[in-house]
Image (cartoon, coloured by chain):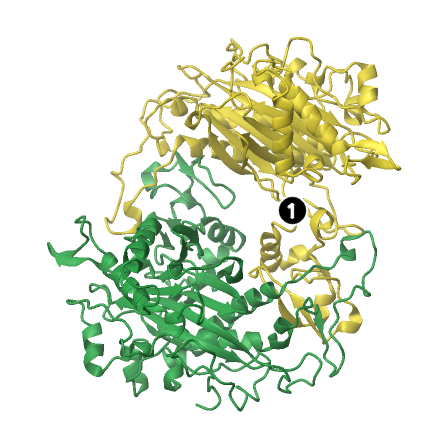
Chain colours: A yellow, B green
Amino acid sequence: MLNRVRSAVAHLVSSGGAPPPRPKSPDLPNAPSPQTAAPPEAPRSPPATAGSGSAAPAKTVEARASFSRPTFLQLSPGGLRRADDHAGRAVQSPPDTGRRLPWSTGYAEVINAGKSRHNEDQACCEVVYVEGRRSVSGAPGEPSQGQGLCFYYWGLFDGHAGGGAAEMASRLLHRHIREQLKDLVEILQDPSPPPLCLPSTPGAPGSSDSSYLVGSQSCWSSQKEVTHESLVVGAIENAFQFMDEQMARERRGHQVEGGCCALVVVYLLGKVYVANAGDSRAIIVRNGEIIPMSREFTPETERQRLQLLGFLKPELLGGEFTHLEFPRRIQPKELGQRMLYRDQNMTGWAYKKIELEDLRFPLVCGEGKKARVMATIGVTRGLGDHNLKVCSSTLPIKPFLSCFPEVRVYDLTQYEHCPDDVLVLGTDGLWDVTSDCEVAATVDRVLSAYEPNDSSRYTALAQALVLGARGTPRDRGWRLPNNKLGSGDDISVFVIPLGGPGSYS
Amino acid sequence: MLNRVRSAVAHLVSSGGAPPPRPKSPDLPNAPSPQTAAPPEAPRSPPATAGSGSAAPAKTVEARASFSRPTFLQLSPGGLRRADDHAGRAVQSPPDTGRRLPWSTGYAEVINAGKSRHNEDQACCEVVYVEGRRSVSGAPGEPSQGQGLCFYYWGLFDGHAGGGAAEMASRLLHRHIREQLKDLVEILQDPSPPPLCLPSTPGAPGSSDSSYLVGSQSCWSSQKEVTHESLVVGAIENAFQFMDEQMARERRGHQVEGGCCALVVVYLLGKVYVANAGDSRAIIVRNGEIIPMSREFTPETERQRLQLLGFLKPELLGGEFTHLEFPRRIQPKELGQRMLYRDQNMTGWAYKKIELEDLRFPLVCGEGKKARVMATIGVTRGLGDHNLKVCSSTLPIKPFLSCFPEVRVYDLTQYEHCPDDVLVLGTDGLWDVTSDCEVAATVDRVLSAYEPNDSSRYTALAQALVLGARGTPRDRGWRLPNNKLGSGDDISVFVIPLGGPGSYS
């Protein structure tokens, strides 16, 4: 099993950000096409040496299922216990032992204040080598003749209703991305436009010509230009879907608990791809300017999508919910009165006469952190949740959740970045109590206190951000300097310097 | 009939932008609630004096159905013939007779170069008085005790497959908006938050308190704050839907031909609401800065919505179409090869093995102006189109089209506008050949040539914009100064000065 999933990425903790050597044997040599592929690794399997983001000391399924932290934290059993302590809430970062994460990435995390037994966030940071599955012009299954590709990868996974999904995603999502990219290795390295069609016959060229076009005046007369960038976006999108499908297949046998938000960054061929499914957030702070690199997917931001689905597929509402939204719960005695509402087509509000079926629970209700789908879940995209049911009901919620991320692309080559330009990823534990501007101010404050070539500065920044969101214990709670409540949630932060591999280290 | 639909708005061509006097009798005195209301006016009815945007000289259903231009152009029969001349393509504007459109609005239009027999654009400019349907605290059906409300209204309607829908919308959409606002007259003038619930019992107060709330920790414990602004947005959204439903009801008896894009502006209580359904566009040019006030709804921009609908309701595809998009048409001989595709969840592209059902026509195909839904229609929102079928098929296209606008709000009171700050509305005939920046440059060039208090400057600007998009006849076509082709489409433009009523006239 270990060989079958062996990652070329074992250099999770690299010393200088240089790509790892190309492995001698291809990964998954006998794997079928990704559409029907077996999972790269079953979630119960032990971690693949240092190449996974899962717990180092875990020895059995049970131990790993109970609690794990990212391998790159290199936690001893004692360190693991301290990381698991809700009272102390000690901030965890990779040890300062001279080896550091790729790109001198900074990382820090802290456990919640008691809302769940363990830290349900997970993280992963990898350099992933992709060998082509086949040459475009070669026989299927034959290894690519050209050079493989390397991508850098960072992932934050914020679990809910258990840590299983986040833990599984932190170990496997980048491998699904690698699987999806295998078909593209040669195409992405060829400056000519991607072939629209790949042959099934060995040796036949891919076709991107227009010789098949019919009707010069019709909408068929054009052929879309497909960019290399959009192929990478498609690969990441499909990887999320395959990850989610794997969780669905294995949820019974392997106890994939709950679900997770996923925020991942892929750096490939000069571009940074930020894919987000859930309520984590990524921003770039560049020369003091804030560039949002994600948006949150919640019952509020996705209300119209959810309502449309409930409207088109009323069977998903089980006769228990209405797809309409009301500003508050309707009481039976209000029947016949006129209440404000909005449906899947509306952004504004209007009055409607209350009818019997309006007394059902609304599909979407609440505001802010209390907003819920079917009174149950507060995020609308992510991985897992295949067993999630409405409270006191057998009605499944998964049909309303989407596993697809929104992917934003940032071209690193379009701007000359300085050492203080960073991409900050955080789970909602950070953003619930910290604004983008406050993060930008902390970036400025912390980085200016360190020499530009001091590679510990990004970890110091991640720690400062986590501490700033956690606060200190005071007045029977965790408090910020302004005496507001700090975040009682798990908090995890990556700080990725945008100079990239080796540019100023 | 005339009384039943009599509009208080008869002052279409007002002399100073002041609101018209309040009518003595309420409109639609016996009308049921808007949800079940009969249409304010049947499309075959003659125009309601000067209060409608339809043709002045039309005397019969047939005459009006054949060709009409906005009343405010005050076209004589000879003028109407000149406006209908594809060879000359004379630019039409309201006559410079001292009376002008509200707010000194500028308007210009020109007929197409032969793509349809008549100009299928329509326009409307009105000041609409709204009398409350009922007091919140009074008996149902009883006229409001307070002051009514006035709104200013501009509408551009770009018809396709006939001029009927555009003509009907130009006469009636603002009346549907008025109907929707009747319930809100007192609420919008009361500075306290809108009541969430209106009583069915006379005299009972509306409820906006939280006394009905259950479970202080649940998502039910909150009640949403609903703003006055969002009520106006909801009223406009519902008005579009009622307009569309009226077209559906009356399409057989009254020959509502084709469909139309609708771009309307409502000014009410200090705010400008821009509602767009289709591919017209509105921008604000303020101190040289461009502020987009709409976006276009096309098969490209709405691809994922269309594909999701086709995926969830495959019966709408009739076994003839696939919801997947491919970059070009697939040939039967390519079966088994792998082609780029994307589905409703993807923004990127990936390869898939071509199967038999992929040979169906794609639901969405083509690019730019050639993009089509079901190989038939190039816009995805608007009014009408209830009879539209796929070419050589009985498959209806309407289920994929949405009548709902996107509404953007601009608060006029947040900025001190100068006479050169304008809101420009144009049908796609303008925008197909003119960029936002080119429009802003023309705004600057034309307005700086006129005195700030010269009220003809906005009409001159509208004419310049239309002329600039039409070009001049040369080399067997209409050409722009750079020798590119001018727009052969109908072109209609409103220029609305943002100083508002009377602020600098």
Q: Quadrant of the rendered structure where residue A478 is?
A: top right
Q: Which residue is at a point 64% across and 87% down the rendered structure image?
A: B142
Q: Does the image show residue B44?
A: no
Q: Amino acid at mark 1?
A: Thr
> Which type of secondary structure does the marked residue at label 1 adopt?
loop
Image-based side of B85 in relation to A90, left or right? left
Instruction: Point out residue B5 in the picture as x, y percentages from the top left corner.
Output: 47, 86
Q: Which residue is at a point 55% across and 61% down the rendered structure image?
A: A345
Instruction: Point out residue A305 in the picture as x, y percentages from the top left corner.
Output: 58, 52
Q: Nearest the camera: B18 or A135?
A: B18
Instruction: Point out residue B119 in the picture as x, y percentages from the top left corner.
Output: 27, 69
Q: Nearest the camera: A370 or A405?
A: A370
Instruction: Determine whether B252 is above or below A267 in the image.
Output: below
Q: Which residue is at a point 65% across and 60% down the rendered structure image?
A: A323
Find disc 1 in the rendering and name its residue.
A298
Q: Nearest the camera: B248 or B430?
A: B430
Instruction: Point out residue B38 in the picture as x, y percentages from the top left corner.
Output: 52, 82
Instruction: Determine whether B27 is above or below A114 in the image.
Output: below
